[in-house]
Amino acid sequence: MPTIFDNLKLGNLTLPNRIIMAPLTRMRSKQPGNIPWELNATYYAQRASAGFILTEATQVSQQGQGYPGTPGIHSKEQVQGWKLVTDAVHKNGGHIFLQLWHVGRISHSSHQPNNSLPVAPSAIAAKNSGTFTADWKPTAILTPRALEASELPGIIQDYVNAAKNAKDAGFDGVEVHMANGYLLDEFLQDGSNKRTDEFGGSIQNRVKFPMQVLDAVINVFGKDRVGVRLSPYGTFNDMSDSNPIELFTHVIDQLNQRQIAFLDMIEPRATSAGGGDDVNENAPSTTKLFRKKFKGIFISAGGYKTEDAKKAIETDEVDAVAFGRIFIANPDLPKRIKNNAPLNPYNRATFYGGNEKGYTDYPALS
Ligand code: PHB
C-alpha cells in the first residue's frame, strides 16, 4: 500500500513524498518588470520539503499577463530573478517546476502591450469574472479580440522562449497551464471557443493548439520534465463545455501519446480555483472520472484535507496530492502531516499582493 510519505518517481527524479505544493498566485514580484526576487526565493525555499513545488502561474509574455504583480519568464531580469528562487530551493534539497501561463481573455488592457484588448480564441467575455488593473483597481473582464490563426505560431514561440528561459533559470521542469479558463483551456472548451477554422468546432480541432504548445515545450524540456494542469467541469472564469467527458478523454489520450511526466487535475468541488473557500460537494469527481485513463503520474488538487489526501493515496485513487491554502500557511507541511502536528490557519487577506506578511512569516514547527 503506498503512503503519502513514500518516494515517487517522476521521470528520472525521485520525489521524497507525495505532498505537492500547488501553483498559487501571490502577486509579489518586484516592480517594475514583474521580476522574482529575494522575498520570493525565501518563500519557496521555506517550502522545499514538498514532494516538489509547482510555482505560481507565470506569464510567458506580456500579452499573457492578466493580474498585477504576477511574475513573468520572458525577460532577462526575470530569468535572473527566478535563478535566485531555484538556487534557494535546490540548496534546501527541493525540486521546483515552473507553471507556464497565458491568461488569454482573463486580462485587462492595462496589462497588454500598447493597451490592446486581451486575446482569446473567440470574442466572448468571461461573465462574473474580474481582475485588477496594472494599478491594482478591481475591474471587470473585457470582451477579448479573437486571435487570427496567423498569430498562433507567435504564441507558440512565446512558450518556447519561456521554456528555454525556465531551463536557463534552473527549473527542474515545467507545467503547462491548460486549466481554469486561461488561454489554452479557452481553446479546449466550446463555451469559449466558437472558432470556425481548424482550431475550433470538433474536439480534435479545439485540442490542436494546446497540443502544439505542449509539443513545442516538450521539445525544449523533454517529456519527463513536462506536466499539464487541467480543470474539467471547472466553472471558474465562466468556463463550460457541452461534453467534458469526451473532450477531456481525448485530451488525456493525447497526453498519453506524448508520455508526459504528470497530469495535475483540479477537483471541481473547489469552485473558485482558490479565490474563495466555497465547496460544491455535488460537483463530479474528476479523479474518479479520469484518473484511470491517464498512464502517467496523477496529481489531484482542490480542497483536500490531509486525512482525505492520505486515504486517496493509500487506496491508489491518486499518486499524489497538491495542497494550496494549507501550504501557504504551513511552510513545513510534510513534517506537520508526519507528526500529526496542528496546522497554522491561513489568512486569506494576505493571499494576493503585499509583502512578507502572510507570505514568509508563517512559523515552522520548532
Ligand atoms: C488567479 O490569479 O486568481 C489564478 C491564477 C491561476 C489559476 C487560478 C487563479 O489557475
Image (tube, rainbow, N blue to C red):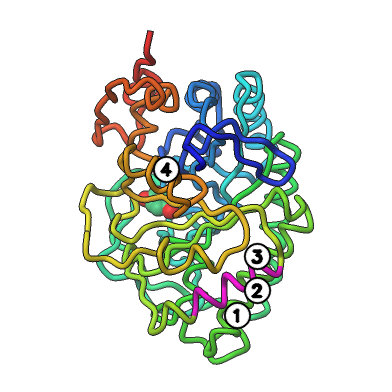
Question: Residue under circle 3?
Answer: 155
**Circle nearer the viewer, 4 or 2:** 4
**Mark 4 and 2 residues: CB-CB less than 8 Å, in contact?**
no
The residue carrying mark 1 is 148
The residue lying furthest to the front in this view is 1
Marking on residue 25:
4
Amino acid identity at mark 1: Glu
Q: Is residue 165 visible?
A: yes
How many numbered discs? 4
Pointer 4 local density, CA inside 10 Å: few below 14, some 14–19, many at least 20 = many
* Amino acid on which the number 2 mark rests in the picture: Glu
Circle 1 SS class: loop
What amino acid is labelled 4 in the image? Thr
Up/down of 41 relative to 303, above or below? above
* Residue receiving disc 2: 151
Q: Is mark 3 within 8 Å of ligand 1?
A: no
Q: Quadrant of residue 102?
A: bottom right
- Nearer-N-terminus badge (3/1): 1
Badge 3 crowding class, 10 Å Cα cut-off, few under 14, some 14 to 19, many 20 or more, is some
Q: Rounded to the nearest whole Å, what is the CA distance between mark 4 and mark 1?
A: 29 Å
Asked whether the beta carbons under mark 2 and mark 1 sit within 8 Å of each other, the answer is yes
Q: Residue at x 52, y 65 (%)?
A: 292
Q: Which residues are magenta?
A: 247-257
Contact, CB < 8 Å: mark 2 with mark 3? yes
Q: Secondary structure at mark 3?
A: helix
Is residue 174 found left or right of 284 in the rendered image? right
